[in-house]
Image (cartoon, rainbow, N blue to C red):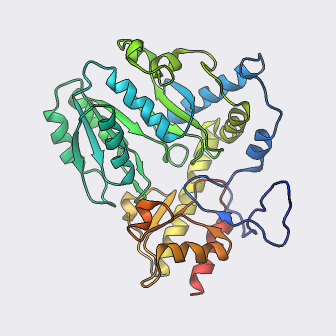
C-alpha cells in the first residue's frame, strides 16, 4: 500500500457541519477511523434481514471473514467482542470436558477471559505474567502437558492493553503435541496482522477494531463438525455457536447497515493481495510510530520483538498524567486512548493504527509531541 503524505484530520459528518473545528484524527484501538466506503455503505437504506437481497450480503461477509482468518466458518452475532467471548465460554461449558482448561493472562484482556470463564463456572487453571511479557511457551507447554488430553487453552492473541502480540502458531503447535484444543481471542489482531486459525478450536473477533467497520458485530470462528458432539440444549439460545455456524443466513435480527458496512470494510481484504497490502501498511505505520516515539524519549511497553504493530502502549512524560496527555493530544487534533480504567490506573496511554489511518496522521502526532 503506497505511503500517503500528511493530511488534515478527517471532518466529522453529521446533521450540523462544523467547518471551524474539524474532528480529531482517530488513533484509538476502537472505535477506529472509518474509510469513506464503509461510511457510505452504512448510510444505505435499511434492508429487512429476511429479504432475498440481504442473504447474499450476509453470507458473503461471513465467507470473507472466514477467508481472512483461514477458518472453516464464521458466525455473526449482534454485539461486541466481549459478547463473542461470552459465546465461546458458553460453548466450552456445554462440553463434557469443560473442567480441563487453562487460561493465559498477560494483560487486561487475558484477565477478562479469566473472569468470563469463571463466571460461566469453568474454573480453569491459570498461568499469569506481568504486562508487556508475551506467553513463555515453555511454561505454557509444561502446563498443557499436565492437562488431561482433550482439554483447552484460552488466551488473547493480541494483548491490546500492553501492545503485545502473543505467539499463536507456537501455542497451536504446543497444544497439538499434547492433545489440547486452542481457543483464542482475535478481537484486536484480526485484520491487523496475519491470523491463521487452522488448528484452532474456537476464536473470537469483532467489527469495530482492525477490520475497520462500526462496532456492533461479534464473530466466532469454528468448524461445525468439531462442535457436533455438543448438546445445543445446554447452550443459551442466542449464544448457540454450533447452530449459528451451521446456519445459512441470520438466525435472529441483524441490522443491515452494520452488515453492509462490514462487507465494505472487508472488500479490500477479499483477496490475498489485498490482505498482504493491508498487513504491510499496518506494519509500516506501526514501525514509524514506535521509532518516532522512541526518538522522542517514550518507552513502548512491549519490546520490538514482541510488539503488535497496530497498538503502542507507553507512559506519558514524567509529571504529566495520562488524562492530561490524552487531553493535550486531543487539543492538537488527535484522539488517543488512556481513559479506560485499566490504563488510567497504571498511568498509561495508547496510540493505535488499526483503522483508516495514514502516514500523515502518524507524522502529525509525532510532530505534535515533539513540540513539548
Q: Position of residue 166 (x, y in %)?
A: 36, 49
Q: Nearer the viewer, residue 17 or 266?
A: 17
In-front residue for pair 272/230: 230
Which quadrant of the structure image shows residue 168? top left
> For the point 53% across and 49% down, which residue is it?
192
Residue 66: % across, % down: 54, 29
Image quarter of the C terminus: bottom right
Q: Is residue 169 left or right of residue 276?
A: left
Quadrant into which the N terminus falls = bottom right
- The residue furthest bottom is 372
Camera sees residue 201: no
Residue at image location 54% in from the left, 56% down from the top: 29
Percent of width and height locating residue 269 = 63, 40
Q: For the point 50% across and 40% down, which residue is it?
A: 81
Could you tell me which residue is drawn at 38 percent across and 24 percent down? 91
What number of labels is visible?
0
Amino acid at each position: 500500500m503506497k505511503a500517503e503524505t500528511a493530511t488534515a484530520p478527517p471532518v466529522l459528518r453529521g446533521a450540523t457541519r462544523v467547518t471551524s473545528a474539524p474532528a480529531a484524527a482517530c488513533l484509538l484501538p476502537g472505535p477506529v477511523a472509518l474509510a469513506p466506503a464503509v461510511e457510505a455503505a452504512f448510510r444505505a437504506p435499511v434492508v429487512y434481514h429476511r429479504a432475498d437481497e440481504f442473504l447474499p450480503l450476509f453470507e458473503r461477509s461471513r465467507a470473507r471473514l472466514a477467508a481472512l482468518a483461514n477458518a472453516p466458518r464464521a458466525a455473526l452475532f449482534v454485539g461486541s467482542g466481549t459478547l463473542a467471548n461470552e459465546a465461546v465460554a458458553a460453548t466450552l461449558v456445554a462440553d463434557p470436558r469443560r473442567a480441563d482448561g487453562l487460561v493465559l493472562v498477560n494483560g487486561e484482556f487475558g484477565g477478562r477471559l479469566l473472569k468470563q470463564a469463571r463466571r460461566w463456572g469453568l474454573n480453569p487453571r491459570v498461568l499469569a505474567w506481568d504486562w508487556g511479557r508475551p506467553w513463555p511457551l515453555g511454561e505454557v507447554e509444561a502446563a498443557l502437558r499436565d492437562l488431561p488430553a482433550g482439554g483447552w487453552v484460552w488466551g488473547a492473541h493480541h494483548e491490546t492493553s500492553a501492545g503485545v502480540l502473543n505467539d499463536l502458531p507456537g501455542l497451536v503447535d504446543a497444544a497439538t503435541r499434547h492433545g489440547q484444543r486452542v481457543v483464542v481471542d482475535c478481537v484486536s489482531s484480526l485484520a491487523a496482522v496475519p491470523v491463521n486459525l487452522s488448528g484452532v478450536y474456537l476464536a473470537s473477533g469483532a467489527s469495530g477494531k482492525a477490520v475497520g467497520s462500526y462496532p456492533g458485530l461479534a464473530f466466532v470462528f469454528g468448524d461445525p463438525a468439531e462442535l457436533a458432539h455438543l448438546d445445543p440444549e445446554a447452550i443459551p439460545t442466542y449464544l448457540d455457536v454450533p447452530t449459528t455456524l451451521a446456519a445459512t443466513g441470520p438466525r435472529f435480527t441483524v441490522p443491515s447497515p452494520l452488515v453492509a458496512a462490514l462487507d465494505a470494510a472487508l472488500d479490500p481484504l477479499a483477496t490475498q493481495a489485498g490482505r498482504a497490502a493491508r498487513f504491510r501498511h499496518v506494519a509500516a505505520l506501526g514501525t514509524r510510530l514506535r521509532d518516532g516515539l522512541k526518538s522522542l524519549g517514550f518507552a513502548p511497553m512491549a519490546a520490538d520483538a514482541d510488539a503488535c504493530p497496530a497498538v503502542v502502549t507507553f507512559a506519558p512524560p514524567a509529571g504529566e498524567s495520562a488524562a492530561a496527555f490524552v487531553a493535550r493530544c486531543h487539543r492538537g487534533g488527535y484522539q488517543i486512548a488512556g481513559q479506560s480504567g485499566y490504563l488510567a490506573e497504571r498511568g498509561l496511554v495508547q496510540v493505535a493504527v488499526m483503522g483508516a489511518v495514514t502516514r500523515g496522521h502518524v507524522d502529525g502526532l509525532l510532530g505534535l509531541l515533539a513540540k513539548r
